[in-house]
Amino acid sequence: MSFSWATCPFVRHLPFSAPPVGNWDAKTSAREVADLLRVVDRDLADAALSQLSTDRRFATAYNAALQLATIALHASGYRAAGAGHHWATFHVLPEIMGPQTQARADYFDNCRSKRNVTDYDRAGEISERDAEEILAEAKTFRKELLAWLTKNHPPLVPRGAQ
C-alpha cells in the first residue's frame, strides 16, 4: 500500500517558519537529533547483548530503527502522533528520503508487526536470525540516515556524529 499524506491522520507537516507551540509544533533542532541518536546508539548497543532474549533484542533494535525514521520525519518538518504513528513513521520514509528507501520501509513495517506480537501477545516468537537481521538493518539505516541528513539538512547533523 502506498502512503497518502492527504488521508493520514497521524502525520502533520510543520512549516519551518511556524513558531513552536507545544510538542506537536516544535521545530527540529540539532540537539533533538543528537538526543534521538543517543537513544538509537543505546538501543543498538543493548540489542547486541547476548544476555537478552531474542524477543528483547529484536524489540530494542526495532526501537532504534523507529527513532531513526523519526529523525528523518522531524528533519523534514513532520510529526507523527497517536495510534498508528509507528506505521505512519515507516510509511513516509520513501516520501521523505526517496523511493530507494521503499524496501527498508517495508522491512521495518513487517518488523513492527512482529514486534507487536512479541511485546503484546506471545514470548519466544523471534528467532536468533530475526534479531541479528534487524540489528544489522538498523545499523545500516543509521549510517544512511546520517549521510542523508548531511546532504539534505546539514544544520541538524550533531557535531561529531558518525
Image: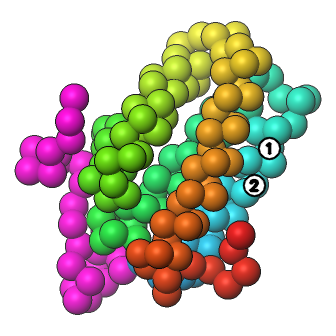
What residue is drawn where x is 73% and y is 80%?
160
Q: Label 1 amino acid?
A: Asp
The x and y percentages for residue 14 are 23, 73
Front one among 72 and 43: 72
Instruction: Report whether residue 42 is seen.
Output: yes
Q: Look at the image and tell me in which quarter the C terminus lies.
A: bottom right
Write down the residue under mark 2.
42
Write down the residue under mark 1.
46
Magenta part of the protein: which range? 1-27
Disc 1, SS: helix
Q: Is residue 147 rendered magenta in the image?
A: no
The x and y percentages for residue 156 are 50, 80
Q: From this viewpoint, which residue is outermost toward the left?
A: 6
What residue is drawn where x is 48% and y is 34%?
108
The x and y percentages for residue 32 are 53, 75
The reply to whether callout 1 and callout 2 are in contact (CB within 8 Å) is yes
Q: Quadrant of residue 40?
A: bottom right
Total numbered labels: 2
Q: In which quarter of the image is residue 74?
A: bottom left
Q: In which quarter of the image is residue 78?
A: bottom left
Instruction: Report whether residue 22 is seen.
Output: no
The x and y percentages for residue 114 are 52, 20
